[in-house]
Amino acid sequence: MDAIIPSGTEPTHPEAVVRDDGFWVNNNGDCLPVSASDLERYTYCPMSWYLSATGHSGQSDSIMAGIQRHKAIHEGVSNFEKSRLLTMRNLTIWQWWFAVVVILLIDTLAFMNINDANFDTQEFSKLLALWSISCLLIAVAAILLPWRRALNISDPMRDLHFEQQGAVKPYFEPMGFKGGWLLGGRLEVAFLIASIVIALHAMALQFASDREQAAYVFAVTTIGWTLLASFRLQRALVSNNEAQLLAIENDIKSGTTVAYSDDDSTTGLLKNAMNGLRGRPDQIVIIDGEFIPVEQKTGKVPSKPHESHVLQVLAYASLVEATTGASPPYALLRYGPEQLHSISWDDEAKLKLDQFVKSVQKTMAEGGAIRNHDREGKCRNCSRRYACPDSLV
């Protein structure tokens, strides 16, 4: 049966014109916006896409179930990443504190075995005290004042990020960290640690005339710092255990880092101004140093990936490349915990994606969206069948 072109499939952007490279632009010269979800709907059925573009939302129990499932996935992934980052933070603090313990232990042994000092320990103690106070003042000033913003300083490793990052953030310094009033980062923490270590040495040198007493002070201090370091290590182990449990629960492989997780409210919309693509991947994970987009599908598990889903995840690969400047080698398409498909992001995939984007934009500019299939089951499962003038069922 031939598809019938129904009335009402007028262009949604009649003012658009085609650009030399085949993409369509509006009066301002901006590419017509095509979301990854638009590509998925258009590939499934152009008429379904058109109904969505003209205000007909999807209506079905499976859509509501999918929304709840995606929300649960986002919460699980976000909680996993928070636990993983908390583990890293506590381990970093433990490493710093353990370094202090090692230094104090060395000092303890030195004071127990060193010969009488040939320099004025009292004067040297005063110099160390002044040095400690200087480090403390620098740290406090750096925390109180937005000096990074004044000097326009940012960590170059932080420039590779996504607009309006989600809730998951790196330890100590969030993405694009530039400090501010009462905000500190790794540099401030380093000055505070230095101030503490130098102050401990200054106090110990006050007892240098009595080496046994000085060694005793160092030994007691070492025990105290060891207890503090042990407490941090215990917290790190607890956080790591929580992260492991969440990883198992959410089928996340060991070593995976989540750079982005979409909840449709706090995460930013990724955009590619060159072709008009936009969208929010379910997740962007870091695997072997590469940003990899992940699309989670919660419906029935097909025998092979649907073409519409492949186009959607390829759009996310394009958005990751446009946002980070680094081309991901592939994108991941997951159908529940059972199937995980790797979709190559190569020249062939890029050409295929551009062709579909241009096709959607052309329909936006010229109209003519039609049902492109004769499958009753496809129409029966369409969430916009209630508004379709050309449904087969």
Image (cartoon, rainbow, N blue to C red):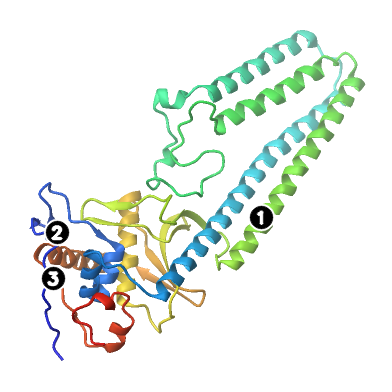
Q: Label 2 crowding class (10 Å Cα cut-off): few <14, some 14-19, many 20+?
A: many
**Quarter-wise, where is residue 7 in the image?**
bottom left
**On the rendered structure, is 83 left or right of 308?**
right
Question: What is the x, y in percent for residue 360?
Answer: 18, 66
Q: Quadrant of the N terminus?
A: bottom left
**Decide: marks 3, 2 in contact (CB < 8 A)?**
no
Q: Which mark is residue 23?
A: 2
Say what secondary structure mark 3 lies in.
Answer: loop
Asked if one can make out residue 345 in the rendered structure from this viewpoint, the answer is: no
Ranked by sequence position, the earlier of labels 2 and 1 is: 2
> At which x and y percent is residue 99?
71, 36
Q: Nearer the viewer, mark 3 or mark 2?
A: 3
Q: In the image, is 272 to the left or to the right of 215?
A: left
The answer to which quarter of the image holds residue 137 is top right
Q: Name, please, the residue furthest toward the bottom.
A: 1
Residue type of the residue flagged with mark 1: Asn
Q: Amino acid at mark 3?
A: Thr
Q: Nearer the viewer, residue 64 or 347?
A: 64
User: Which residue is denoted by mark 3 in the rendering?
Assistant: 9
Give x and y (percent) for residue 317: 34, 61
As drawn, 326 above or below 310:
above
Residue at 55% across / 25% down in the picture? 143
Query: Is residue 129 visible to the viewer in this orientation of the structure?
Result: yes
